[in-house]
Image: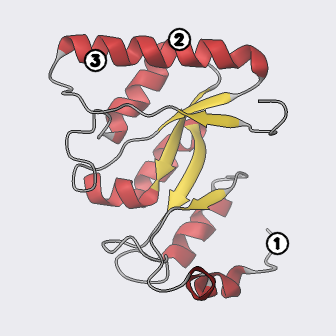
Amino acid sequence: MQATGVKRVHLMAGIASRGDPKAVAAFRKSVAWTAEFFGPHGLDVVIEPINARNVPSYFLNDFAFARDVIAELMLPNLKLQFDIYHCQIIHGDVTMRLREMMPIIGHIQIASIPSRNEPDGEELNYPFLFGELDRLGYGGFVGCEYNPRGNTVDGLGWFKRYAGVKP
C-alpha cells in the first residue's frame, strides 16, 4: 500500500440478492471489516453502486442503500464511489444526488450515457456537471471509465477543452 501511494480501495459487492437478509448482513459485515482494516493505514474504502443493465444481479445497485450503509457504519474512511454513468441509469437526477451525497463521496467516475463512451455529449451536460463539482468543493480526481469509440488517443480529444483549466 505504501509503495504504490494508493489513497483508496474499491470494495466490490459481488452478485447476490439484496432481498436476502443473510446477503445484506454479510455485505455490511465485509464493508465494516474492510474499512476498519484499512483505516489505520490511512486508506479510504469506497463502495460503488452499479446498474443492473451492465451487471445484472449486482448486489449494490442503489445509491440510497449505499448512502444508508455508510451512515449506519459511521466509519470515517468509508466513502461512496459516485459513478455518474451508473447514477443516471439507476436513478437519474444526478445533480441533486451529487449535492446530497457530496459529504460522503470519495471518488467520482464519468462516461457518456447511454453509450458508455467518451463524456462528450449524449444525455448529460458534463460541462455543467464539472462546474457543479467545483461549486460543491469536490477536490478529488474524476476518473474516466468508458469505452473509447475508436483508439484511445483520439478518444481523449473531448478533454482538450478542459486542459490547463485551473479552479
State the quadrant of the C terminus. Answer: bottom right
What's the residue type where badge 3 is placed? Val
Residue 72, image x and y in percent? Answer: 44, 16
Image point (73%, 52%), residue name: 139
Is label 1 or label 3 in front?
A: 3
Q: Position of residue 108 (x, y in %)?
A: 56, 53
Residue 21 seen anywhere in this rendered image of the structure: yes
| Amino acid type at mark 2 | Trp
Horizontal arrangement in the rendering, residue 55 relative to residue 39 (left or right): left
In depth, the one of 127 and 140 nearer the eye is 140
What label does residue 166 carry, if any? 1
State yes or no: discs 1 and 2 in contact (Cβ < 8 Å). Answer: no
Of callouts 2 and 3, the N-terminal one: 3
- Label 2: few (<14), some (14–19) or many (≥20) C-alpha neighbours in 10 Å: few
- Whether 37 is drawn above or below 48: the answer is above
Q: Which mark is residue 33?
A: 2
For disc 3, the marked residue is: 24
Q: Amino acid at mark 1?
A: Lys
**Label 1 or label 2, whichever comes before in sequence order:** 2
| Residue 32, percent from left and from top | 50, 14
Whole-Å distance between the Cαs marked 2 and 3? Answer: 14 Å
The residue lying at 29 percent from left, 50 percent from top is 51
Image x and y of residue 151, in percent: 54, 84
- Name which quarter of the figure residue 88 lies in: bottom left
